[in-house]
Image (spheres, rainbow, N blue to C red):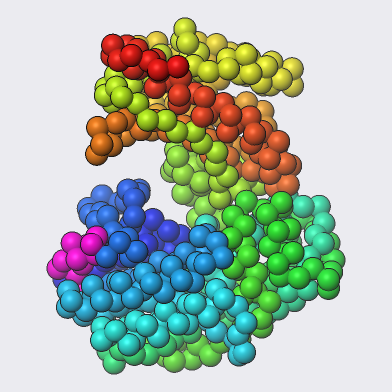
Amino acid sequence: MRHCLVMGAAGYIGSYLVPYLQQLGYQVTAGARRPCRLPDGVALRLADSLKPETLPPALAGVDTVFYLVHAMGAGAGFHRLEQQGVKNFAAAAHAAGVRRIIYLGAIQPEPCHSRHLNSRRYCGELFRESGVPTVELRAGIIIGPGSAAFEVMRDLVFNLPMMVTPKWVRSRTPPIALSNLLHYLGGLIEADGVAGHIFNAAGPELLSYQAQLQRFAAHIGKRCPIIPLPFLSPKLSSWWLQFVTSVPQPVAKALVGGLKHDIPADDGPLRALLPQTLLSFDDALAESLALEQQLGAEQQEQETPLGLRWRHPEYGFYDRTASGEANCLATPEVVWQVLAQLGGEPRYFYMNGLWVVREWMDHLIGGPARTRGRTNPDRFVKGDMLDSWQIIGVDEGRRLDLLFNMKAPGVGRLEFNILPEASGLTRITVTAHWHPQGAWGLAYWLAMLPFHLFIFQGMTEAIAKTAEANAGIPVMD
């Protein structure tokens, strides 16, 4: 039985590919920079292509590698990170004797003036030059829950009464259903004579982004006029998307750079090699919306994007975050004992007056924020209530996750993490995650951001000082 390593298992494609390969009967190992949700029977190996020392242990005993890593969210220099990561990983894979690398790239227009697409092409070349047999699968827009290009489309359709869009919405691309792409990826494990080859994975229709938006709107029974404006440059477009979609600005910028091209693709060789029925855009869309409903129901009120927005399709998949962090001289156990008082006598440890103001604001519009008290005053239990918050995740002594229940244009959660450091200090982190409801949800987040940064930093410092005082450590003011 072949042993497959999925590098980038925590990402969009990886999160679907891991269980798909497992269903096909392969031994699957997930490679990721940090812990992530995995099916039973799948081992996690912490690996970062930019940290070469982490790669040999991850590649031990591996036969086939799926390399799904990209760095679009890192900002302007993402292409340098992508290429250095590929160099590091290819060298480690060659030393480990990997039989085959399957690299997921991007369909290339001619000519190409997109840094995102050019970086994908060059990364494929680096793999082929590495000495490890490599097959590159190039795809365009993927129709499935969590795909950045699909989520941009989704946010626009669900949340805007009309769209003023740049001219790149007229560029054409062959969108492919997630299920069709998974079939191709899985089939390349055993395919013969594919080393060094480049295959295009495309859907059966060549559609403009505007046509996809219009068909999406029609599918959900919404009329959404689209007015393209020629003066919106790709750079301005990426900033515009930041205020109307939840997709992070660096990712949106990289995507827009590729969407400005017509991207036709000859997928005949791949269809001949791995035949299947390709879904039309409408069928792929129906499949995607049904899948997100299924997964959302399974994950409801869990710390996942689909679980949080279940029953609320207008909420964004990607979250905005704000956090505070402090180091503490007390042990993690003492810090957890302090955190366990949350919602009790110390309430939220810092600026409780501001919390009260926010609660009254919610109460005046019919929200539940004036609900006080805890279901269980002694310990955190998943599903219990803490004031108007619901506890949705507990890792005793290490992590607490609360679901935001006040009335607001979006859904959020508040995450507390307590981590022992190698130095002997304990790091306390409080992070707010916000999945906005369109432009109003993003405006709400931006309005609250200064308060969040101020409050969460003060909260972590207050927890640290209380824990140090409880441990008999002198508190330095």
Residue 258 is situated, as x and y percent measured from the top left of the image, at 61, 75
Residue sticking out furthest to the top:
345
Q: Is residue 309 visible in the rendered structure shown here?
A: no
Q: Is residue 180 above or below residue 365?
A: below
Along the line of sight, the residue nearer the viewer: 185 or 102:
102
Q: Is residue 403 above or below residue 198?
A: above
Residue 140 occupies quadrant = bottom right
Residue 9 occupies quadrant = bottom left
Residue 225 is situated, as x and y percent measured from the top left of the image, at 83, 62
Question: Quick one: quadrant of the C terminus?
Answer: top left
Left or right: residue 155 compared with residue 203? right
Along the line of sight, the residue nearer the viewer: 36 or 94:
94
Q: Is residue 236 magenta?
A: no
* The magenta segment: 53-63
Q: Main secondary structure of the magenta part?
A: helix
At a point 42% along the width and 79% down the height, the residue shown is 123
Q: Is residue 92 above or below residue 430?
A: below
Q: Is residue 420 visible in the rendered structure shown here?
A: yes
At a point 55% along the width and 20% down the height, the residue shown is 388
Along the line of sight, the residue nearer the viewer: 32 or 76:
76
At a point 49% along the width and 16% down the height, the residue shown is 349
Left or right: residue 2 compared with residue 18? left
Residue 262 is situated, as x and y percent measured from the top left of the image, at 66, 83
Residue 255 is situated, as x and y percent measured from the top left of the image, at 60, 68
Left or right: residue 334 compared with residue 442? left
Question: Quick one: quadrant of the N terminus?
Answer: bottom left
At a point 50% along the width and 67% down the height, the residue shown is 78
